Image (spheres, rainbow, N blue to C red):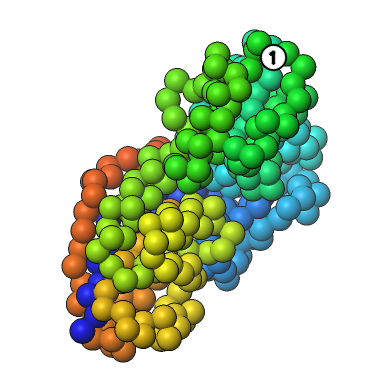
Amino acid sequence: MLKILLANPRGFCAGVNMAIDCVDRVLELKGPPVYVFHEIVHNRHVVQDFQGRGVVFVNDLADVPEGGVVVYSAHGIAPEIRRQAKARRLVEIDATCPLVTKVHAEVIRFGKEGYTIIFVGHRNHDEAVGTVGEAPGSIIVVESPDEVPGLKVGNEVKIAYVTQTTLSVSDCAKTVAALKARWPDIKGPAKDDICYATTNRQAAVSTWSAEVDLVLVVGSRNSSNSRRLVETATSAGKPAYLIDDEHELDPAWFAGMGSVLVTAGASAPEHLVDNLIQRLRNEFGGEVYERELVEENVSFELPRSLRSLALIGHEGGR
């Protein structure tokens, strides 16, 4: 028998739920095609499902018909994208996670106050690109503590930092510690930027990895928070694998293994976890034991721009 510890919380966070609801609602109001700038969330199954329903994901607003509707992904966008949208008379539906918007606001504030801003995160991630766009002339991206000693800033006094919302909590802490060691007076956000869901999922893996032989994380490879869960498990000394769904499971992983921790990144749908559990039950006689670290009851309202679109759609249907 295989013992399966099922981590809770896992899967969709409030920001992902809100973003997916946004696209569903636009499909309902406008019908296909619906254009989304970048992947709405970083999950292959979510993206493919929407594509099958008439959603077109674009990386260039020139691919959206002039005057059309565009939904911005949960990861946020740079002001330049908004300028392009207005020039093309696009109807903008902003599905940016409010916790990402918080980081944008911090960057704008620090920039106006004349600070050099250090953004701790992954340079090419959609969230980083959008955030850096708020103050491109005064922001530097740092991915690790190793980069801190070589940073060159114009003003050594007015330094501030913000972070990507989906980082490894422990890795981020090391980078922030390096920043504070170099600039003891560096200013930071009033409240940590790493989101509650990222923190909770990593804490669950840290807590229960010690009880199992291996860890399985359901999530896509371009999902930052999902990859961080794998890193959390390997840091605890356990073999860990990131899989999109149950079809990527390799039976060889379970040779000599008696227990597994199953979790999912914040953009992974719950039905993928259910399918994985079913396969583990069928092939390995798996028995599930749910473990809850903390109850999550966070939710975000749909954006005002979507409510405006609903009014337009209602009037147009009269």
Residue at 61% x, 22% y is 182
Left or right of 289: which side holds 230?
right
Residue 151 seen in the figure: yes
Label 1 Cα neighbours within 10 Å, binned few <14 / some 14-19 / many ≥20: few
Front-most of 304 and 316? 304
User: Which amino acid type is shown beneath numbered disc 1?
Assistant: Glu
Tell me the element at label 1: loop
Quarter of the rendering occupied by the N terminus: bottom left
**At which x and y percent is residue 159?**
63, 17
The image position of residue 99, as x and y in percent, is 47, 35
Residue 223, position in %: x, y?
54, 56
Splitting the image into 4 quarters, where does residue 108 fall? Answer: top right
Q: Residue furthest bottom?
A: 283
Which residue is depicted at the point 78% across and 37% down?
Answer: 84
Question: On screen, 312 above or below 60?
Answer: above
Asked whether 181 or 264 is in front, the reply is 181
Q: State whether residue 202 is above or below residue 131.
A: below
